[in-house]
Image: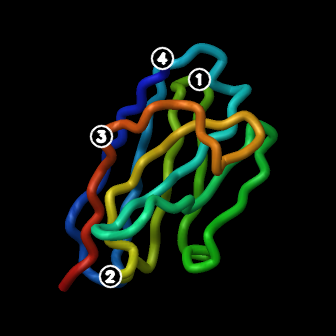
Amino acid sequence: QVQFVESGGALVQPGGSLRLSCTASISMFSIYGMGWYRQAPGKMRELVGQLTAGGDENYLDSVKGRFTISRDNDKNTVNLQMNSLNPEDTAAYYCNLFVSNPYSPLGSWGQGTQVTVSS
């Protein structure tokens, strides 16, 4: 059973930046696509961005141009660089892995990392 450990969340002012990290305890990490998801209070969890094993990226429209996903297969880690943060980005952020469909992630959810954007 794969496990995820997310970190890097914090309280940040509007316009600020954060870098989230997620480490996955799974072998052959490089063959999986990785996704970042978020869930705000009272809302459903949503896919923020995905990075396939082949390196293709895709993002939620509201974060395009502000968020960037990267991965380090040697360290089983996926990162989310978030710039120009706004209060609508406030949520708990999670990572997960997929084979072909990021809307059907394979692992159990980790504890997440909280991002709060507020002045």
In this figure, which residue is indicated by the disc labeled 1? 74
Amino acid type for the residue under numbered disc 1: Asp
x 42%, y 44%: residue: 21
Of labels 1 and 2, the one closer to you: 2
What distance separates the C-alpha of mark 3 from that of mark 1?
A: 23 Å
Colour basis: rainbow
Dot 1: element? helix
Amino acid type for the residue under numbered disc 4: Gln
Amino acid type for the residue under numbered disc 2: Pro
Q: Earlier in the sequence, mark 2 or mark 3?
A: 2
Dot 3: element? loop
Give yes or no for contact between labels 1 and 2 (Cβ–Cβ under 8 Å).
no
Give yes or no for contact between labels 1 and 4 (Cβ–Cβ under 8 Å).
no
What distance separates the C-alpha of mark 2 from that of mark 3?
A: 21 Å
What distance separates the C-alpha of mark 1 from that of mark 2?
A: 34 Å
What distance separates the C-alpha of mark 1 from that of mark 4?
A: 20 Å
Quarter occupied by residue 87:
bottom left
Q: Earlier in the sequence, mark 1 or mark 2?
A: 1
**How many callouts does the rendering have?**
4
Dot 2: element? helix
Amino acid type for the residue under numbered disc 3: Gln
What distance separates the C-alpha of mark 4 from that of mark 3?
A: 15 Å
In this figure, which residue is indicated by the disc labeled 4? 1
x 48%, y 44%: residue: 95
Of labels 3 and 1, the one closer to you: 3
Q: Is residue 62 left or right of residue 41?
A: right
x 66%, y 17%: residue: 28
Q: Earlier in the sequence, mark 1 or mark 4?
A: 4
Where is residue 50 drawn, in percent x and y? 65, 52
In this figure, which residue is indicated by the disc labeled 3? 111
In this figure, which residue is indicated by the disc labeled 2? 87
Give yes or no for contact between labels 3 and 1 (Cβ–Cβ under 8 Å).
no
